Image (tube, helix red, strand yellow):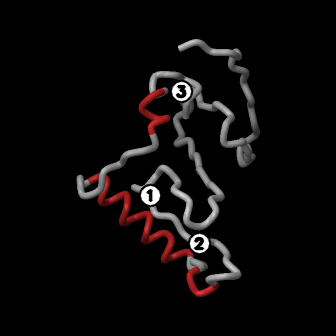
Amino acid sequence: MTRQHQPISLEVKAGSAILLHKRTWHGAGPNQSPRIRWSFDLRFQPPGFNTGRDCFPGFLARSVAEPDSVLSNAETWAALWSNARFDIANGKRQAAFNNRWQRYRDDPLCA
């Protein structure tokens, strides 16, 4: 694969947040600390659009048209994710992502 740009490092303090555009190539080097490194991938998606991550649960955060469909209970959200993780780990659900993951899986900039 030909890379048009060279990678640059972006160091942030613990507890910081980085916001990226959907077309920003990004990745992380190896975790060289003895602690777990956390990463959260939060995405805004218009209702009804495919996320490309059907193995993970989505939810409606707000809706004027369908206010009764909004998920506002953190325990319910946590249970949805816990169930999805359990199903993936036990082979009940296929953890397939959009084709970008397969196509660029060996590129260190593809997270």
Q: Is residue 11 left or right of residue 44?
A: right
Q: Are marks 1 and 3 in contact (CB under 8 Å)?
A: no
Which amino acid type corresponds to the residue marked 2 in the rendered image?
Leu
Q: For this view, does 75 lie left or right of residue 55?
A: right
Residue at image x 44%, y 58%?
Answer: 56
Secondary structure under the numbered disc 3 in the rendered image: loop
Q: Which residue is mark 1?
A: 56
Residue type, numbered disc 1: Phe
Please identify, in this view, whether the residue under mark 1 or under mark 3 is nearer the observer: 1
Question: How far apart are the two marked residues, 2 and 3, measured between alpha carbons?
Answer: 34 Å
Q: Give the structural element (helix, strand or loop) at label 1.
A: loop
x and y percent of residue 89 in the render?
29, 52
Q: Crowdedness of circle 3 by 10 Å Cα count: few (<14), some, many (20+)?
A: few
Relative to 3, residue 60 above or below: below
Which class describes the residues within 10 Å of circle 2: few (<14), some (14-19), or many (20+)?
some
Alpha-carbon span between mark 1 and mark 2:
14 Å
Q: Tell me, for residue 30, which label it has, or none.
A: 3
| Mark closer to the chain start, 1 or 3 | 3
Give the residue type at disc 3: Pro
Where is residue 75? Give x, y as percent: 50, 76
Q: Nearer the viewer, residue 23 or 78?
A: 23
The percent position of residue 27, horizontal first and vertical second, equals 60, 31
Where residue 60 is drawn, which disc sits there?
2
- Please identify the quarter of the rendering in which residue 88 is found: bottom left
